Amino acid sequence: MRLFPCDRYRLPLPEGHRFPIDKYPLLRRRLEAHAAAGAALEFIEPHAATDDELRRVHAADYLGRVMAGTLSRDEVRRIGFPWSRALVERSLRSTGAAVDAAAAALEDGVAASLAGGTHHAGTDWGEGYCVFNDTAVAAREMQARGAVERVLILDCDVHQGNGTAEIFANDPTVFTMSIHGARNFPLRKVPGSLDVPLEDGTGDDAYLRSLAPAVAESFTRARADLVLYIAGADPYEGDRLGRLRLTKAGLLARDRLVLDAARAAGTPLAIVCGGGYCQDLEAIVDIHAATMLLAAGVIPGRGTAAP
Ligand SMILES: [Zn+2]
């Protein structure tokens, strides 16, 4: 399984910034250890998203301000990261990683970006640690290459995929499903093709009972040639921003449900990480690593013994 890491494009964050940027190198190292022990994982440097790729989703004037460092103070505050050249490079690479993972999934059946899930970025804005919308760019790029006609974006980050919903609001070729905390960020949700809002404190069983029919409905209605799966670690009970109560086992069951649905439909699936804001970085790494190892067949799928 091909994996596209971006952790060498580091963000210089101010002291005390609450974004846990160190989770990314830890995740890569954890998966490299599995590869060294025999897991069929391949690590490939992603390309930097090109101007052509970005322009299929984002407004030229917004892109120009990001590249030139001329975003307004409010725009920078909304993104939540201080502007720097390194932020631009990192954002281009993590968007490129989603494009590369989508292309690899179409060849291999499954692949993943070890970053991204930047679903709060809309046509002409960045927000909530998202500068460019990686899955939106990947969807449009695969369409532009003629590799797919229809795409399904399954967003299981705990926050609503408002940017993705806005981008594809008038595009019937991309189906956007978001299952998220109803009272969580962003305050103003943008309706997608299918939204599943959940109450604070929702646990494993109720979550999975809501997810299963939503995934089934998404596959039926999307008739997609490619699935992009945002496997956020932030529905986890230990997350500082999540407010749902999913356990690691519940999150793995979520991943199984999504992967099984894609396999049953015979639809290639590319994974991006999504959020994760637990103080305990190892817990975030456990969750993302389990998603990747399940997809790679290292952790057994349905019908086999639990790991
Ligand atoms: Zn999130």
Image (cartoon, rainbow, N blue to C red):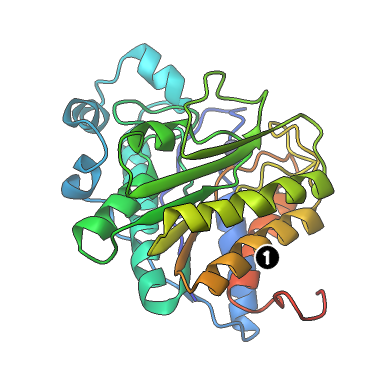
Q: Residue 112: image x %, image y %? A: 48, 64
Determine crowd level at label 1: few under 14, some 14-19, many 20+ residues with C-alpha closer than 10 A.
some
Q: Residue furthest bottom?
A: 38
User: Which residue is located at x 45 percent, y 75 percent?
Assistant: 109
User: Which residue is located at x 58 percent, y 28 percent?
Assistant: 15
Whether residue 49 appears in this view of the structure is yes
Q: Residue 179: image x %, image y %? A: 61, 41
User: Which residue is located at x 39 percent, y 13 percent?
Assistant: 74
Please name the amino acid that badge 1 sits on.
Arg
Q: Mark 1 highlights which residue? A: 256
Q: Residue 142: image x %, image y %? A: 28, 59
* Viewport quadrant of the C terminus: bottom right
Split into quadrants, the picture shows ligand 1 in the one at top right
In this picture, residue 248 sits left or right of residue 297: right
In this picture, residue 259 sits left or right of residue 94: right
Whether residue 3 appears in this view of the structure is no
In front of the other: 168 or 84: 168
Q: Disc 1, ligand 1: is the CB inside 8 Å?
A: no
In front of the other: 27 or 10: 27
In this picture, residue 270 sits left or right of residue 83: right
Q: Is residue 59 above or below residue 45?
A: above
In this figure, what is the number of numbered marks? 1
User: Which residue is located at x 74 percent, y 60 percent?
Assistant: 253
State the SS at label 1.
helix
